[in-house]
Amino acid sequence: MNLKIMSLLPGFRYSKVAAPVPAGLEPGGRLTVDAAQIPRRATGVTLRRGVTYRPGLRLDLCQPAGGGRHPLVVYLPGGGFVVARRGMARRERAYVASAGYVVASVEYRTVRQRATLREALVDIHAAIEHLASHADVYGIDPGRVAVWGESAGGYLASVVGLKEPNIRAVIDQFGASDLRRVADGFDPRMNAAVADPRHPIHRFRAADANPIDLVASAGPAFLLLHGDDDRIISPAQTLLLHDALRSAGIDSTYRLLTGAGHGRLALNRGQVRHWTSVEVMTILIDFLRRHLQS
């Protein structure tokens, strides 16, 4: 998938060098995981594919078996603002659902539909409204909602979490937080590519809502995860957001994964497996339990 996404629009590429590890990392902020240890396939969950939440847009819903109301986790797939495939992270979403959460993977409009950030946020808001209005059908507790995303989806999760009043928790995996500085630390070729007005960041108008600029004195709890060998989004981006959240008095946890790359767009499969490891999935579920189970 990585080569396909990279070829969709000019200017979207890897940096030849990794960005420097950001200064100011807190004790315990660096994490080394056993990438060979991946969770078993989830059991006791049901999957509804292709639920239409507004004309032309669908979501996939993974639900725990049994009755009752469960917290909702809205998953926003990444894809460089070029694609938003709701089928991404299927195994990881099922694993989270098996821990007692309804997980909705939401497709949203991207530059391929000539959409900008504004339209994508409208789509995501509509998906959350649809899920809340059908809470009885889907077994959702609409008072306990988290958003979770990777890459472009991580950026959007942060924006949604900081703009929507009813979000209680945000999981941002290697998303950008300040698009004005997104190429800092990378090679000149990467900087030139990002400066190109044809780059998806500009076509999507992502800098219209930098998460770093949306931080206020109140907000949802954040879990920020990044790889130290990410060649697309520097780990400094999530650390900037973490520091801003902490300064505003917001609960934020930051973890830098040794050897990890940019999720499914990492340089090799070994780097990808960090994100599907037992340790990373346990961190996600523990975070959700702390902030959605009460």
Image (spheres, grey):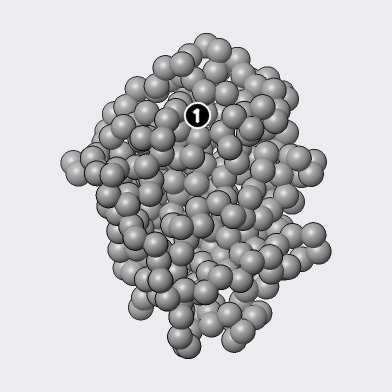
Residue furthest out toward the left = 27
Residue drawn at point x = 57 percent, y = 45 percent: 78
| Image position, residue 236 (x, y; %) | 40, 32
Return the x and y of residue 57 as percentages of the image width and height. Answer: 74, 60
- Above-or-below relation of 189 to 150: above
The amino acid marked with disc number 1 is Ile
Q: Residue at x 48, y 88 (%)?
A: 67
Q: Residue 138's image quarter?
A: bottom right
Q: Nearer the viewer, residue 77 or 1?
A: 1
Residue 55 image-quadrant placement: bottom right
Classify the position of the C terminus by image quarter.
Answer: bottom left
Position in image of residue 231 (x %, y %):
45, 26
**Picture residue at 62% right of the left edge, 55% below the top:** 86
SS category of the residue bearing label 1: loop
Q: Nearer the viewer, residue 203 or 270?
A: 270
Q: Which residue is mark 1?
A: 232
Whether residue 221 appears in this view of the structure is yes
Judge from the rendering whether residue 175 lies leftward or rightward of residue 261; answer left or right. right
Q: Is residue 236 visible?
A: no
Q: Quadrant of residue 105?
A: bottom right
Residue 191 in percent (x, y) is at 55, 17
Figure check: 10 above or below 149: above
Query: Is 37 situated left or right of 135 in this image?
Result: left
Q: In the rendered view, does 127 fall on the left or right side of 289? A: right
